[in-house]
Image: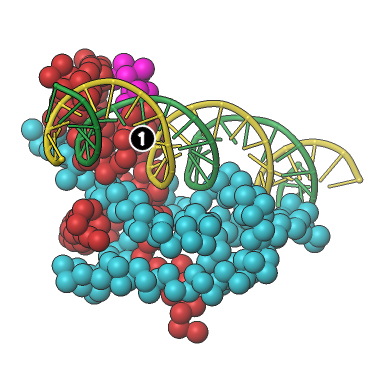
Chain colours: A cyan, B red, C green, D yellow
Amino acid sequence: MLEYDQLKLENQLCFPVYAASRLIIREYQPFLYKLGITYPQYLVLMVLWETDGITVNEISGKLILNTNTVTPLLKRMEGMGLIKRVRSTCDERKVLISLSDKGKIMREKAALIPLQLVEKINDESIDLNKLMELKETLNRLIGLLTKSDRY
Amino acid sequence: MLEYDQLKLENQLCFPVYAASRLIIREYQPFLYKLGITYPQYLVLMVLWETDGITVNEISGKLILNTNTVTPLLKRMEGMGLIKRVRSTCDERKVLISLSDKGKIMREKAALIPLQLVEKINDESIDLNKLMELKETLNRLIGLLTKSDRY
DNA sequence: AAAAAATATATCGCATGCGATATATTTTTT
DNA sequence: AAAAAATATATCGCATGCGATATATTTTTT
């Protein structure tokens, strides 16, 4: 039946996205392992390397993660000495997150990761243009799914 | 610097895949909630609806998940009465997974989900062709990343 | 045939993710 | 100005994911 065909894995859009996400993160794994961080921790650092000293909310917004994911993540990172968490004085609801020296220094080592990954994934079966297009479509989809006025 | 540019979220491929994956699963959430199952549980059911009575390994292979993820997942589903786990008699290392009546019946309710999601996501900013292309590229990438002889 | 290697599950520990909810602070209403 | 609403974090509980490792069974080597 037609309806049942839609229930096959290969006919779904979600499964390839879900599987690809996990597989790409697995590719990062050996590089991140050397730095002693996980993929979400790497994401937080990337945000901070770009804009240091932002709030928990701003980080969770950029990463599209809930604060109940980000708060414990940041606490772990504080424990690891990568970041500092300081409650804002002008608005005591806010907690400002900034890089420690250790977190700042890590940027240099991390800078090599994207290039190494491109080399690793680089393959004649997928050209770079296709991957750029992929990124574009995904970003469009993300934009659509994060529009707050959807309902 | 050029290397540091690669460390920006917007220049990464992985982040859009990772974020899109979570966002799409969030879209499934209200529908799956009605069925009382999670997204990975839904994936397992889809596999079984297509091919009932397969081994733990075959399921983990199709979902590209490790057995240490799948085993507890299946145990939970057995506890929920969705599936049955029976150790194979011809090869006692294997455990055969089959649908219970409850699991079989759920297929009918689940059959409506893909259509409802398409309606929900359907938007003039992304046409269906783009999404098909997206799926294609992702599947190519998955194929590349799961080749066992990569190293 | 006995030993070694391979295969199939399973267990453990830890880090996410997230729905539901709590707490403190600030802003808006009345 | 007091009450209500909104905002910003945080806590709790539970279900993944996965690296490391253990156990049982089967297959391959010697």
* Residue B2 coordinates in the image, percent (x, y): 45, 83
The correct choice, above or below, for B74 with respect to B18 in the image is: above
Predominant secondary structure, magenta span: helix
Q: For label 1, count other residues whose C-alpha is less than 10 Å away and answer few (under 14), some (14-19) or many (20+).
A: few
Judge whether residue A80 can be spotted in this image.
yes
Q: Nearer the viewer, residue A110 or B13?
A: A110
Q: Which of B135 and B76 is in front in this view?
A: B76
Q: Residue at x 36, y 54 (%)?
A: A26
Query: What residue is shown with label 1?
Result: B68
Mark 1: which secondary structure?
Answer: helix
* Residue A23 coordinates in the image, percent (x, y): 32, 53
* Residue A14 coordinates in the image, percent (x, y): 28, 47
Left or right of A91, for residue A65: left
* Residue A52 coordinates in the image, percent (x, y): 64, 69
Does residue B76 show up magenta in the picture?
Answer: yes
Q: Name the kind of residue labelled 1 in the image.
A: Asn
Judge whether residue B121 can be spotted in this image.
no
Left or right of A124, for residue D19: right
Q: Nearer the viewer, residue D19 or A17?
A: D19
Chain of the residue under label 1? B
Q: Which residue is drawn at 25% across and 50% down?
A: A16
The correct choice, above or below, for B129 with respect to A1 in the image is: below
Q: Which of C14 and B73 is in front in this view?
A: C14
Q: Quadrant of residue A133?
A: bottom left
The correct choice, above or below, for A18 with respect to B76 in the image is: below
| Most distant residue in the bottom direction | B1
Q: Which residue is drawn at 36% across and 36% down?
A: B69
Segment colored magenta: B74-82
Q: In which quarter of the image is residue A68?
A: top right
Name the quadrant of the N terminus of chain A. top left
Count of numbered tags: 1
The correct choice, above or below, for A111 with respect to B140 in the image is: below
